Amino acid sequence: MNSIKDSVIQKIIRSFPALKELASVSAFEVPKNPEFGDTALPCFRFSAVLKKPPVAVAEELKKIFRDDTSFESVENTGGYLNFKYSRKAFAESVLSDINDGSVFERLKEEGSGKTMVIDYSSLNIAKEPHIGHLRSTIIGNSIYRIYDFLGWKVIRINHLGDWGTQFGKLIYAFISWGDEKELGKNPVRYLQDLYVRFHKEEENDPSLSSAARDWFVKLENGDPEARKLWQRFKDYTIEGIKKTYDRIDVSFDFYRGEGYYESGAKDVIKMVEASPVSKISEGALVIDLEEYGMPPCIVRKSDGATIYSTRDLAAAIDRHNEFGFDKMIYVTELKQQLHFSQVFKSLELLGYDWIKKAEHIGFGSILGISTRKGNVIYLEDIFDEAKSRVLDIMKDRDIDETQKDIIADKIGIGAVIFQDLSRSRVKNIEFDWERVLSFDGETGPYLQYSYVRIVNIIQKSSAVINGMPDFSLLTDDVTYELIKTMSYFESKIRSAYNEHEPSVMASYLINLAKEFNRFYRVNRIIGEENDVSESRIFLLIALESLYRRCLQILNIPVIDKM
Ligand code: ARG
């Protein structure tokens, strides 16, 4: 391992063995003011062990690095030890840390042994899909990838909306007007159409309402015919949406809809009934949350049925029993914040202390997104639309048509995903196809294009990398800036993780692309002296591997041609 930070830590521990437990590479911070240096080690936490104020500690530690040629300067500013690297040592440290994989291994250890459960995408069967499901899928998947990158074991659950009175309507509609073949063709849309038709016919014939209700009661009571149809609707829907998920490289460990927790929900009702925190209000069984400034959490409706929150109470308990998670995350629109606060508080009152490990990760809306097909937004419509627009842009490109089709699909997907992840998740997004698909500016296509450029240079170069290149050739200003940006990867992924904010990685990748393009404008790679070419290629190999990982974390398709 070659990192400067590592050697700093080792030197400190050699001089002060008492700091063995406290001093670690992850303690370094990016200095608040770049003038101070390239990296900073806060000395506050060493104070107690060394029995000195932080400023005095920093002063002591500073002495260790008096003759260290890795640094241009080491300064103590108010208890922070600020290191300014010598550019050569810096290039060597950052690039070899990436090229020998140490940085990735180090990050992979952080979550090792820990389990996270994430509930995202969670479409509803029959009910209109909405744009929130697109965002939940994209944001949820990126959060999963961040945790996975940090070595967590992640359990991905698609909590399908597959229970509730709409299934009575759907069963009635299917028995009356349904067509098995049509269902097989495009189940998601077909069920939605049947659902819409039911509501239309119901206006003329109110008896449909009670017929639908009867079917739902049958479903709840385990009537074989109702169950069989329900299961079929579910299987078809999952099969249908899996195609879209596959296309955008999203997958789940479990499709566990609300129906899965139906029997658990019955147990929850019994448990809540017996608990002193519950009461009956207007015939419904509720947990009173007035003291916490929230409306009551309804556990059983006055007609005896369970609701969305009952099933979420059951789901949380079930997941904890099965996975014993260290963290559980729900990714939905901000609109559901109150729902989750109620569920979490109720579980806490019922004595489930582990619910403190759960968190609702909310996000804002996308405004102005529409496709040529109309207003109801199905996930695949958005990606189809993006693809057809990219094909328009690429129509004069001289690429084999099949290839072009594949590439256009990936550019379209990358564009939509980047747009979604580019801003802090709680913000609303104004969607504008032209801007999203532009090849320059802060867009998915720009990111993919820059990546293709990096790969092409590496492929075209004839430089042979044998061992370490001459790092003193990587010390000019633009190269230094690029390497510095590369060195931020570690701290960026940690903050993306801490804040559950993929946008941190999105803006980081934009910076990385910009710095690379600046570097590329100024520094030729092919046609330079051998040792210059070699050192620059060594740099680009590191950049490619870092860049590719950022694309993967964001779930932007990695392409090497466009
Ligand atoms: N199906 C719900 C919806 O579309 C989202 C489910 C989120 N997850 C949960 N455990 N409640 O609004």
Image: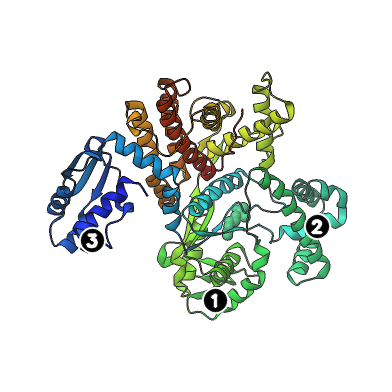
**Residue 138 found in image quarter:** top right
Mark 2, secondary structure of its residue: helix
Q: Pointer 3 and pointer 1: residues touching (CB < 8 Å)?
A: no
Q: Is mark 2 within 8 Å of ligand 1?
A: no
The residue that label 2 is drawn on is: 208
Q: Residues within 10 Å of mark 3 (few under 14, many from 20)?
A: some
Residue 512, placed above or below residue 249: above
Amino acid type, callout 2 = Leu
> Measured from the top left, where is residue 72 in percent x and y?
21, 36
- Residue under label 1: 272
Where residue 277 sits: x, y (%)? 47, 75
Q: Nearer the viewer, residue 163 or 410?
A: 410
Q: Nearer the viewer, mark 3 or mark 2?
A: 3
Task: Inspect the image, locate mark 1, and give the three-letter code of the amino acid beneath it.
Answer: Val
Q: CA distance from mark 3 to mark 1?
A: 50 Å
Mark 3 or 1 closer to N-term? 3
Name the disc covering residue 19, or none.
3
The residue positioned 35% from the left and 28% from the top of the image is 473
- The residue nearer to you, when weighing 359 against 439, is 439
Q: Amino acid at mark 3?
A: Leu
The tag earlier along the polypeptide, 3 or 2, is 3
